[in-house]
Amino acid sequence: MRLKTRKTWSQQQLAVKLRMHPNTGEGFFNFERRRLLILAAKTTLAAALSWWLAKLFGVRDGYWGSISAIIVLQSNVGATVTASRDRIIGTVIGAGVGFAFSLMRPLWLSYALALLVAMIVCGLMGLRNSSRLAGVTITIVMLVNYEGAKWSLAFDRVIEVLLGIVVALAVTTLVFPDRARIRLRDGLAQEFLLLGALFEAILQGFRGAPAQNLQSLRDDVEAMRQGNDQLLEASRNEPSSAGWPEGLNMLSQFGRSLFEALLALELAVRDSHEDAYAQRLEPELGKLAADIQSGFNHVANCIHKWRFDTPPEGFSLEQDIVELEACAEAVRTTGLGFSQAEIVRAYAVQLHLKQIARMLRAARVETSRATGKTHE
């Protein structure tokens, strides 16, 4: 007898709301195509506007502003702010170092020393991305033939880059803005749905054959987590109302902890296809598993709506745990005739299920407090 989870329509309905078709992903890809077209249009606008403004204000090499706008304009506001910060810092450091070392001779030695100093300075400041941009600026300032003072070339370079960055920031903020925190919110909701699907697939291997899509689900969760980590980093550079940064960071941590707990559960259910002792923990064990599945969907729905003060309806994970512990205590002395490994596996599964249930509840309750809602 295989332990079952209770399937609901909420997962499918929420997937549609998140612009993801639950089977083919068609809706998600259509949405991604629209985002790609919008990004292309915004990048074109920023580059053209930078070039026009450079000509309007008489900037000598205005194309550098267009190049900067193309480079720093990213898919969302937070990533654009991050790229802009790295580029302007790298340009300023490169311009300053390049001008200072351009006064030294021979050129090949001063150029090499300038690159080394800039890389070390950026590294000590924790600005790895800026170090490459500083090197590019040093190369332009020191090696490009220019009729005039080197300080003028360095200053012009900073102004050109700054123009492109300002235009890119204005375009990404004002023209169809794509907020990293909104994308992260939907990404975290999708992550919890995938964790629920992984949980269901793992339990198919409890007293039964393992699910065939188990590896692909693990890979999907890993890929989703990596994408969400990038969005989390970008969202930290966006202005947001109180509760958003704390809530997003907390949910990301709970997602990581739940994934690790699911991997531990997967190890616990191995070699359990012939186990019979766990049936003595039914129906309480099965009820907890079914309600955990509903719990993943409920937390995902809370994330999507960004409202965590509504407790789930129709089930209580806390009550499920109490009933399972009472059942386990009642059958503790009835294990004669079963192997020790079988009994240990059954109780390991029980402990992992209780841990996952408590983390799911904590994910909702703690995020509710972080976002200013304390009702449990």
Image: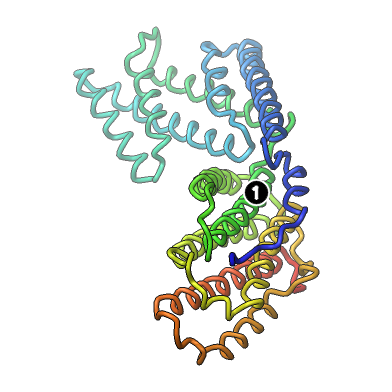
38 to the left or right of 269: right
Q: What residue did someone put label 1 on?
A: 190
Mark 1: which amino acid?
Gln
Q: Nearer the viewer, residue 84 or 359?
A: 359
Q: Quadrant of the C terminus?
A: bottom right
12 to the left or right of 94: right
Establish if 89 lies above or below 203.
above
Mark 1: give few (<14), some (14-19) or many (20+) Cα within 10 Å. many
x and y, in percent, of residue 218 in the image:
50, 50
Please give the name of the residue rendered at 53% of the width and 61% of the height, measured from the top-left corner. 208
8 to the left or right of 270: right
- Note whether residue 233 is visible: no
Please give the name of the residue rendered at 29% of the width and 26% of the height, measured from the top-left corner. 101
Give the quadrant of residue 369: bottom right
x and y, in percent, of residue 315 in the image:
75, 72
Please give the name of the residue rendered at 66% of the width and 60% of the height, measured from the top-left corner. 296
